[in-house]
Image: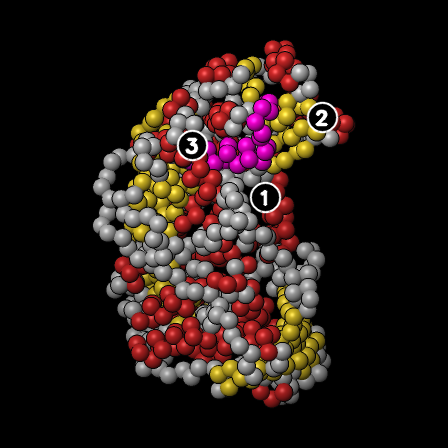
């Protein structure tokens, strides 16, 4: 299928061929009929992409702050790869469309194949021939409403939410500053609410259009006619509400707002304009300044948007989806007329030229629609490819059984023919895969990146373009059934790891799965059942820290030990941003369940054994202490803290035994103290946490057919110990790992 994309680094626009998105549970696959260009938001993004790197940084200081923090935590090299990977990628455009349901995912019962729906979301209602849209971001189109008019649904919802924030009342007077697409819709919605409207815009054509659509009068912001009209309509008191629907860097809109507002009036910011509020003027009138956040309640809430959890109508009357349905109803009943706003309907094949004309100013437009080729809907409703549920609630238990590893075959495999490349497939191509794994594999001798499969079309296309995959798809079964693929990398979200690993093992593939291997005991048992059923135990979990050069060298310098050891591991994890998928504990497991295996595995590597018991307790500030007991009396304490300072190293480790001490400082420096002191040289450029060496070991095992780099028993023990943390927290007591070696 085709999709409009832009490279944010170079500014290049393209109409790209990308794989068709999969139809996941909780949503529908929609074939686009019309999609709307937001001549404000989208053109601002297009313009930013054409800026220099310095210009981009100046336009997004919030992102610059994140980069600085990442450098402090992950080092310059890893941060550079991550940032450049994001910049030099195709990004989607669009967020408002109307189309026909082509496939229905599991759990959806309010629409059927062939239904016309309006869709919202800058990740789901894209300028693309097909989109997967979750439940709360689509709504059926009322009978009689033209599809091209329904494509205004998202932008209409933005205007509607702004008007709701202004709380208009019958007989009031409102000032709308900026008569672009949003401003024109705000004018109509206010008029439909019984409010008299004065519009402001420097473009006389837009002013004439707003008057035609219901405004009492409109004019240039510097025009005395606007001031006199406001005085006449309000008896000299000033307007009750001001709606800032303008963009740009000028401060004139907020200065005009205070000048024409009444005492204790309301100012609602809908657009993205400069807000340098004249303090004294706003203070003296005690103006109520409000912000309108996009389409309404639910926006930016992943539980609402992605997981389909609605807000009870008794508590939240107008959500994103209800706003979308309301605007469509107003349009269907003729209370809002969007047809006069349509400046051009362009064929989708002409998308790149249309954007260029808008950006260069050749096309003066309020609203532009893309019209898609007519195609029949697909076959009947489908179930989609389901994801595994997250961490199950577990009752407190004093003992957790480490599942026994029963192989149907051996731990070796036939060696690859001499000179034959190792053919790899990736399931998932997110930030970690594209910044930490694929750069070490692309264009490597003896390795062929054969196939990449993702649930979103554009991420697969990006990975194919940047790393040279032979094929990009959203069809998982086709990849697992491909006999030419030697090994599969599972680099998806945590909740899907166990199921995808199980399926890949049953398909006879050698598997590399990023941590965690499993989020529940049942998931772990399912993976081992697949090993037993297939006889395929060719599995590696991405515990890369044990392969880090400093860990390897420090372990050699420390040497063998005879007595028990004490290990202390401080992980300064830091706080996550609101909205991070790591916070979705009900579906993705706890944060420690997701990454705690890294630290347990590193401790086990240095202690030369697997843990036999786990005791965990949490502080009121959510900091976590995990005490692991090992055979022979050795112990490891992992302090997993989120309350530490941002500038402090992320990981520090101390190991003491037999009168010697080993210290690891954030994978930048290591030292060993004994009769002689050894200190590593400081790494010159970046922290090396072992990803390259880990991949070297994995590829060697695939190529030669030799044993996997980490014994399966150890992978299982580390996973079981990570799961035992949750059990110990629930029961408030140590958990014995029954069956542990």
Instruction: Reply above or below: 378 against 486.
Output: above
Q: Is residue 149 visible?
A: yes
Does residue 709 appear to the left or right of 422 in the view shown?
right
> Could you say where residue 529 lies in the image, as x and y percent from the top left?
36, 78
Task: State the extent of the magenta-drawn residues as a range.
Answer: 153-177
Q: Which is closer to the viewer, label 1 or label 2?
A: 2
Cα distance, mark 1 to mark 2? 38 Å
Pointer 1: what residue?
Answer: 63
Marks 3 and 1 in Cβ contact (< 8 Å): no
> Could you say where residue 651 lies in the image, as x and y percent from the top left?
63, 65
Of mark 2 and mark 3, the one earlier in the sequence is 2
- Residue at 52% x, 59% y is 584
Quadrant where the N terminus lies? top left
Question: Which is nearer the eye, 369 or 686?
Answer: 369
Question: Which is nearer the eye, 394 or 538?
Answer: 394
Marks 2 and 3 in Cβ contact (< 8 Å): no
Question: Which is nearer the eye, 384 or 547?
Answer: 384
Q: Is residue 87 visible?
A: no
- Residue at 39% x, 77% y is 528
Cα distance, mark 2 to mark 3? 32 Å
Q: Can you tell which quarter of the image residue 5 is in?
A: top left
> Could you say where residue 338 lies in the image, as x and y percent from the top left?
41, 26
Q: Can you tell which quarter of the image residue 592 is in?
A: bottom right
Query: Is 167 colored magenta in this rendering?
Result: yes
Q: Can you tell which quarter of the image residue 264 is in?
A: top right
Pointer 2: what residue?
Answer: 263
Instruction: Reply above or below: 243 against 406.
Output: above
Pointer 3: what residue?
Answer: 330
């Amino acid at each position: 299928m085709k999709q409009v994309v832009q490279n944010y680094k170079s500014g290049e626009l393209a109409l790209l061929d990308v794989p068709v998105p999969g139809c996941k549970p909780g949503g529908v696959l929609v074939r686009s009929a019309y999609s709307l260009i937001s001549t404000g938001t989208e053109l601002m993004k297009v313009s930013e992409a054409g800026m220099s790197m310095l210009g981009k940084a100046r336009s997004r200081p919030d992102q610059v702050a994140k980069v600085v923090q990442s450098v402090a935590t992950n080092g310059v090299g890893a941060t550079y790869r991550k940032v450049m990977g994001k910049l030099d990628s195709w990004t989607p455009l669009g967020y408002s469309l109307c189309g026909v349901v082509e496939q229905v995912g599991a759990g959806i019962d309010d629409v059927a194949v062939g239904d016309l729906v309006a869709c919202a979301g800058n990740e789901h209602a894209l300028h693309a021939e097909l989109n997967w849209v979750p439940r709360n971001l689509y709504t059926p189109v009322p009978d009689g409403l033209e599809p091209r008019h329904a494509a205004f649904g998202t932008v209409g919802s933005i205007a509607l939410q702004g008007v709701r924030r202004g709380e208009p009342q019958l007989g009031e007077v409102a000032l709308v500053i900026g008569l672009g697409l949003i401003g024109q819709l705000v004018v109509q919605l206010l008029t439909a609410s019984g409010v008299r409207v004065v519009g402001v815009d420097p473009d006389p054509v837009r002013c004439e259009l707003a008057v035609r659509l219901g405004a009492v009068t409109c004019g240039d912001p510097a025009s005395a006619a606007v001031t006199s009209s406001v005085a006449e309509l309000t008896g000299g008191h000033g307007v009750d509400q001001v709606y800032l629907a303008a963009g740009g860097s000028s401060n004139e809109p907020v200065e005009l707002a205070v000048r024409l507002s009444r005492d204790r009036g309301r100012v609602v910011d809908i657009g993205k304009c400069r807000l340098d509020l004249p303090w004294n003027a706003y203070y003296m009138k005690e103006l109520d300044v409000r912000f309108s956040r996009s389409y309404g309640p639910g926006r930016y809430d992943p539980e609402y948007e992605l997981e389909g959890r609605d807000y009870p109508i008794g508590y939240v009357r107008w959500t994103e989806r209800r706003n979308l349905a309301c605007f469509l109803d107003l349009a269907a009943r003729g209370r809002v007329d969007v047809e006069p706003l349509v400046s051009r309907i362009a064929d989708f094949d002409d998308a790149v030229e249309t954007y260029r004309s808008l950006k260069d100013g050749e096309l003066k437009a309020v609203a532009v629609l893309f019209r898609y080729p007519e195609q029949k809907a697909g076959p009947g409703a489908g179930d989609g490819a389901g994801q595994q549920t997250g961490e199950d609630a577990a009752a407190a238990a004093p003992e957790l059984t480490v599942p026994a590893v029963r192989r149907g075959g051996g731990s070796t495999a036939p060696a690859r023919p001499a000179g034959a490349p190792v053919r790899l497939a990736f399931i998932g191509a997110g930030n970690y895969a594209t910044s930490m794994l694929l750069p070490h594999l692309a264009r490597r001798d003896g390795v062929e990146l054969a196939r990449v499969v993702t649930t979103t079309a554009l991420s697969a296309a990006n990975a194919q373009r940047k790393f040279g995959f032979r094929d990009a798809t959203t069809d998982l079964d086709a990849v697992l059934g491909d006999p030419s693929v030697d090994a599969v990398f599972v680099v998806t979200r945590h909740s899907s790891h166990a199921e995808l690993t199980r399926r890949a093992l049953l398909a006879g593939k050698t598997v590399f799965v990023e941590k965690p291997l499993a989020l529940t005991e049942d998931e772990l048992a399912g993976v081992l059942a697949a090993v037993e059923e297939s006889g395929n135990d060719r599995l590696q979990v991405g515990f890369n820290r044990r392969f880090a050069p400093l860990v390897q060298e420090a372990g050699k310098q420390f040497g063998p030990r005879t007595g028990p050891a004490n290990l202390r591991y401080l992980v300064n994890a830091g706080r996550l941003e609101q909205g991070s998928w790591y916070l979705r504990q009900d579906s993705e497991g706890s944060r420690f369940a997701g990454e705690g295996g890294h630290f347990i595995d590193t401790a086990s590597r240095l202690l030369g054994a697997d843990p036999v018991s786990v005791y965990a307790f949490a502080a009121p500030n959510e900091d976590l202490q995990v005490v692991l007991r090992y055979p022979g009396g050795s112990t490891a304490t992992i302090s997993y803290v989120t309350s530490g300072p941002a500038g402090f190293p992320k990981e520090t480790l101390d190991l003491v035994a037999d009168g010697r001490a080993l210290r690891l400082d954030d994978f930048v420096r290591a030292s060993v103290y004994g009769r002689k002191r050894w200190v590593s040289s400081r790494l010159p450029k970046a922290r090396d946490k072992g990803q390259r060496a880990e991949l070297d070991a994995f590829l060697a095992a695939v190529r030669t057919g030799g044993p996997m780099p980490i014994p399966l028993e150890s992978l299982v023990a580390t996973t079981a110990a990570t799961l035992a943390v949750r059990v110990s927290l629930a029961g408030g007591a140590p958990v014995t790992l029954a069956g542990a070696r």
